[in-house]
Every structure is written in structure tokens, then in C-alpha cells.
């Protein structure tokens, strides 16, 4: 392709005989170079921010969970920034209608950007009975193709997330899910894998599982159909959706993170601040 571009330059400089069809083919091939060498990559992202945050509220936190500050940055703003750092082409968010401040904050980002950056953000305000219902709603906003979905309260090392996105982009698997051996959750979802890190099951009990789900999901268009069928069958909760993926034969690769935290209690905020202080 480099030779083709060189040929265009030589011919157009010396002779005006270049066929327009040939020129178009060469230019198109050169434009596709970004996908081969790995720059100018793009990814779609989605955030479930529709939970009530009841446990934080019961412990005296007045802000809705998406707007809780960790290390001087709101949880949702941190995710949006990290997504932008990882070539976000599209970001979809769902938040609930209980507190209007989250929707107002997202509307301000849509109009004014985040910091000095324009954000390709679209969001919906809708209260849902479960995380799976929220994901199913997000599917109406997301275009077809690969996307990364996360809950709003995941806190992780940015470098590990970037490596995961690159891994997912270049994977032929039906999905790629971050996992971690760090367990600090009231009801963790344990993940069993085979020797090649293909996920074989999702479990409520530890058994001989080495990992737990990190609450981050790399998925594709086919997963939207599974979510829709789960809704039709009365299935709720993301963990049951993940089990449905395995039951339908999806090839899902696990990608290990060293540590991922969830923000459910005020103590989790303190842990996350310390974690980011040590890993920034």
C-alpha cells in the first residue's frame, strides 16, 4: 500500500494519465491502513448508571452514585475521560429518573464537553428494575459492532483497561470480559475458565474458581439479541445474562486485571482513593 501511494505521487507529478478508478482503489487501500497497523482505532462504550445507590445514601452520601467523587473526579466523568483516551467513537449512558442531577450533568457534557474535549455522548433517563433491563435499553442506542459495557462504579488501573480494549479489538471471540482475583464484594460473581482463558461458567459460589467478574464486558452485536431474548423470558440481572451467553455457546475470553473495585459503601470510596493514589 505504501508503494501504491508512492505510485500515485510519481504519476500525478509527471503525467496526467492516472485512471480515476485506480486512484480511488489506491486511496481506499491507504485509508484502510489504520486498521492494519493499529492506529486511529475506534470503540463504542456504554455505561449503566441507573442504580439507586441506596447503600451509599443510607451511609450519608448525598450525591447520586455517578456523581460521587473519587480522587477529585466524579465516577462517571472518570469513565468518560478514560473512554475518550481509548478512542471512543460513541458513548451511551443510561441513568435513572430518581435524581435529575445526573441527567443534567450528562446534558451539560453533551453541550459543553468534558474539560476541553467534545464527547460523543448520548444518554437516556429511565428507571429500570435490574442491570440487565438497563443494558437492554442501552442496546437501542448502540450501533452494531463491538462495544465495551461497564457499570458506573468500577474503578481500575487505566493502563490495564487500555490493554484490555486493544485485546478485545483484535480478538475473534464473541466477547471479552475482564476478571480479577481480587475479591471485595458482598455477592461476587465467580468465573470459571479453561486453560486458554475461555470462560466456561459464572457461579454464585467460589468452588475452584480463581477469578470474579470485574463488571466490564466486551461484547458484539449478537449479544444484543441474547439480551432481548432474556427480557422476553423474564430473566433479570447481568449475571444471568452472562450465563445465557455461555448456554448459547458464546466464545468469551477472560482478560485478567490485577484489581477492580466497586463503590457500594463509603468505605469503598476510601479504598478507591487510596488505590488510585498508589496507581496513578
Image: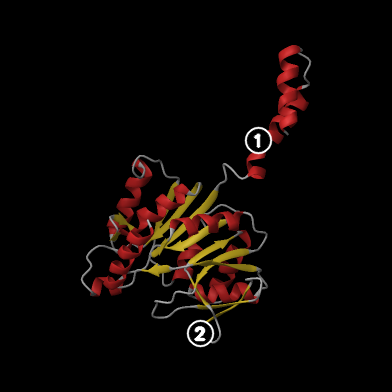
Q: Residue at x 58, y 63 (%)?
A: 224
Helix or strand or loop: what does disc 1 sit on? helix
Helix or strand or loop: what does disc 2 sit on? loop
Q: Residue at x 32, y 69 (%)?
A: 271
State which quadrant residue 260 falls in: bottom left
Pinpoint residue 121: horizontal percent, then vertical percent: 43, 48
Q: Residue at x 45, y 45 (%)?
A: 120
Considering depth in this image, is 239 or 32 the residue closer to the camera? 32
Q: Quadrant of the N terminus?
A: top right
> Can you see residue 263?
yes
| Left or right: residue 21 compared with residue 248 | right
Q: Which residue is mark 2?
A: 206
Considering depth in this image, is 63 or 278 the residue closer to the camera? 278
Residue 68 vertical position relative to residue 238 in the rendered view, above or below: above
Q: Which residue is mark 1?
A: 31
Residue 132 vertical position relative to residue 10 in the rendered view, above or below: below
Pinpoint residue 268: horizontal percent, then vertical percent: 31, 71
Query: Crowdedness of circle 2 by 10 Å Cα count: few (<14), some, many (20+)?
Result: some
Q: Quadrant of the C terminus?
A: bottom left
| Left or right: residue 62 compared with residue 191 | left
Pinpoint residue 102: horizontal percent, then vertical percent: 31, 57
Q: CA distance from mark 1 to mark 2?
A: 48 Å
Amino acid at each position: 500500500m505504501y508503494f501504491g501511494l508512492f505510485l500515485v505521487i510519481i504519476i500525478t507529478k509527471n503525467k496526467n494519465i492516472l485512471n480515476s478508478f485506480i486512484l480511488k482503489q489506491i486511496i481506499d487501500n491507504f485509508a484502510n491502513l489504520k486498521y492494519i497497523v493499529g492506529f486511529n482505532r475506534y470503540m463504542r462504550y456504554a455505561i449503566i448508571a441507573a442504580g439507586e445507590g441506596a447503600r451509599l445514601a443510607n451511609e450519608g452520601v448525598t450525591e447520586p452514585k455517578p456523581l460521587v467523587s473519587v480522587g477529585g473526579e466524579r465516577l462517571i466523568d472518570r469513565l468518560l475521560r478514560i473512554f475518550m483516551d481509548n478512542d471512543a467513537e460513541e458513548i451511551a449512558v443510561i441513568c435513572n429518573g430518581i435524581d435529575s442531577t445526573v441527567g443534567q450533568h450528562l446534558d451539560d457534557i453533551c453541550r459543553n464537553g468534558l474539560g476541553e474535549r467534545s464527547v460523543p455522548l448520548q444518554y437516556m433517563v429511565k428507571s429500570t428494575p435490574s442491570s440487565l433491563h438497563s443494558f437492554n435499553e442501552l442496546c437501542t442506542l448502540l450501533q452494531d459492532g463491538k462495544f465495551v459495557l461497564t457499570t458506573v462504579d468500577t474503578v481500575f488501573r487505566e493502563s490495564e483497561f487500555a490493554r484490555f480494549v486493544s485485546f478485545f479489538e483484535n480478538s475473534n471471540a464473541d466477547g471479552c470480559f475482564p476478571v480479577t482475583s481480587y475479591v471485595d464484594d458482598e455477592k461476587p460473581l465467580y468465573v470459571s475458565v479453561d486453560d486458554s482463558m475461555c470462560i466456561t461458567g459464572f457461579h454464585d459460589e467460589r468452588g475452584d474458581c480463581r477469578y470474579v467478574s470485574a463488571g466490564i464486558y466486551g461484547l458484539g452485536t449478537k449479544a444484543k439479541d441474547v439480551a432481548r431474548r432474556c427480557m422476553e423470558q423474564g430473566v433479570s440481572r447481568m449475571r444471568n445474562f452472562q450465563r445465557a451467553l455461555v448456554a448459547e455457546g458464546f466464545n468469551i475470553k477472560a482478560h485478567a486485571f490485577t484489581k477492580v473495585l466497586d463503590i457500594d459503601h463509603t468505605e469503598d470510596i476510601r479504598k478507591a482513593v487510596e488505590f488510585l493514589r498508589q496507581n496513578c
